[in-house]
Amino acid sequence: MGAPPDGQTGLQLPKRLQVVVEVPKNARPGITKLAVDVDDESELHILVPMEAAAGDRIRISKVSGGPWTCVVLKSQPVYDMDSKKLHAPGDDDCKLQLLVPAHVKPGETKLQVTISDDEQVQLCVPEYASPGDLVELVRTEEQWTAKFTRDRFALGLDPKSNLAVMADLAKTSSEAGLDVEAAVERLFAAAKGAGCFVSPKIKRGCVPPLNIPGLVAVEAIEEGEELIRIPSAFHITPPSVEKAAPALAEAARSSSLPELRRLEALHAFFVARLLADAQDRAVSGDLQASSAFRRWTATEGQRKVWEAYADTLLTEDFSYHPFRLAACSPAEMRRDLTPSQEAEYFIDMATDLMSLHETMLRSSEAAGMPENVEAEMFLRARMSAQTRVFQTCVDTTLVPVADLLNHSPTLTPGVLWSWDAEAEAMIVTAVRAHSPGEELFTTYGARSNMLLYRTYGFTLHPKEEPSFTYIIRPHLVRPIMKIFMDDEEARPLILLETSHIDDSLCQVLNKVARKGSDAIEFLRLLCARSRWSYEQDDRIRPALDALARARDADPGSHAWWKHIDETHKELVQQDSVRVIMSEYLCLTAHLEAADAADASDDAADAGSYLSSCEAWRKSLVKALRLCKTGGFSISSATPA
């Protein structure tokens, strides 16, 4: 088109101005204002729209003479809540409650909530939110507003007096001056004299790789050779205590304790009395003195074995055990184990054990018993049972001599113990040959590092850990429990294990299924919410980054210790980090099982799941799918 003739004006098109800006990460929709340069001299202030999220772009434009307008250019993923069950409190259809889904990115993901066939609401998940947070949608004047809620729990005051007593377990009796090696030799001699069998080829010793006192071969030992045989008459169990000290047992029965706690208290009180006598003998130098046995009905052989056994127990200081470490410094224990909740468990145990001692003390005093023992001895006795107990025909069994064996640092122990019901004896047998000077290792069970640490006070190298464990505490996942279950059904702890499906998980999944809720989504939310705090913790970030590198190289690998950078190698050796990573891997494995249960093809992406959990995962996937059709039992969920 040519130029207009002189004196004529051409068509003037409206001038259009357009600017595109990105919503910054720290922006708060509906609150934050952005200053936008629109030309060399002008600055426009705009309120970040409610429907915008960090990373979205906002296009601001105007036609000359017209108003400014803005359009949100959505760039974040949208999580469609159409298939998710909403909960309407009461009969008020102006309020809806839902949970932040497991697979979201706070600060990025938008939730698209279907209200009805004709109405949808879209809202951004704020940066401060986490999976499982409660979202309440409220309709006001034809608009919906959203409120994100997270429960916060304040810790109670630490029971300082109880913790102080537990902290004293770091000490042995300085006045007693006990010789550990001499005490063990007396125990061996007493056991042999009473008719037990203790092989002359073993002795107490301390050798690499553990360098912890245990049992060592002094001569060559053949495969299948019997090394220790301790008849049940010399085991210390609640039934044997009731028989040897009937008056003490009667005092325990008069307590207000439930049956299992009563037996636990009786067992600990009896061992505590043995320990008190052992200290008196050591201080006086009279190895024949024993006040308790004058009132008890134990045989002469039992008396000698149990007295010698108490001498060995008295030498333990328990300085390594987390119960005692938590008592010495609760704040330090919390710092080391955060984000795990295990520190709270250790601290709570001091109060529980002190309460148990006080109840038993009142019962014995009311019965006119002279069997009073100090709290320190009671705690020492209970800790001895915690770290040494066997399960024979009785769940709580202390077996002298046999409990000197250490747990194998690998998955292949050299000796195994067994309960011979016909002979009524504990028998320890070598399952392979041993050379002189080699330590004899048994197994305390295929336990995760979390369970090993809370029971025995040690952990294995992560490459030797046979399974992973996490305990869900309902008060920390209350919003999820509130949506999926009734509050009164949300109280028990839920044990997550990658070695088996625990009964606590079986029961809660079945309850969710019976209410018509999605058990898969329930488990996914429990685990995602629990895992969230681990992923926000800077201290374990190097370990989590190492795990990510391990899975980049091999999606089925959990070998984080192989991929950790040199500056953080010490984390691999820390008990606290091993416990934390055991819990994190357990939660990850359960999340993967939930994803697998939702997948239509059993073989799809199987290689991307943790390979060490494959057999267990198949069982849980089967269980979760059975929940869709009514429920499952542990036996029905286990593949043939």
Image: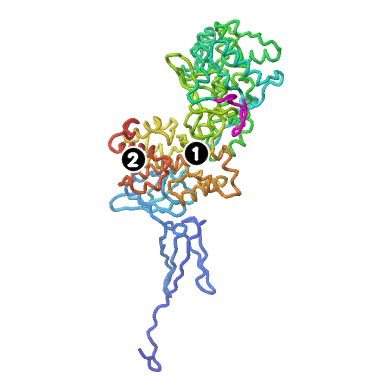
User: Against 67, is 13 above or below?
Assistant: below
Quarter of the picture holding the C terminus: top left
Q: Residue at x 58, y 29 (%)?
A: 438
Q: Is residue 207 magenta?
A: yes
Tell me the residue that label 2 is attached to: 518
Tell me the residue that label 1 is attached to: 582
Marker disc for residue 329: none
- Tell which circle, 1 or 2, labels the residue nearer the N-terminal end: 2
| Dot 1 crowding, Cα within 10 Å, few <14, some 14–19, many 20+ | many
> What's under tag 1, amino acid-wise?
Ser
Quarter of the picture holding the N terminus: bottom left
Q: How many marks?
A: 2
* Residue 617 or residue 59, whichever sits in front: 617
- Residue 208 is situated, as x and y percent measured from the top left of the image, at 61, 33
> What's under tag 2, amino acid-wise?
Asp
Give the residues drawn in magenta, as a range.
205-220
- Residue 472 is situated, as x and y percent measured from the top left of the image, at 46, 35
* Residue 183 or residue 55, whichever sits in front: 183
- Residue 397 is situated, as x and y percent measured from the top left of the image, at 50, 18
To which quarter of the image does residue 16 belong?
A: bottom left
Q: Residue at x 46, y 44 (%)?
A: 149
Decide if residue 215 is in sight here. no
In the rendered image, the residue lying farthest to the bottom is 6
Could you tell me what secondary structure mostly forms the magenta stretch?
Answer: loop
Query: In front of the other: label 1 or label 2?
Result: 1
Q: Secondary structure at mark 1?
A: helix
To which quarter of the image does residue 210 belong?
A: top right
Q: Is residue 43 magenta?
A: no
Q: Secondary structure at mark 2?
A: loop
| Dot 2 crowding, Cα within 10 Å, few <14, some 14–19, many 20+ | some
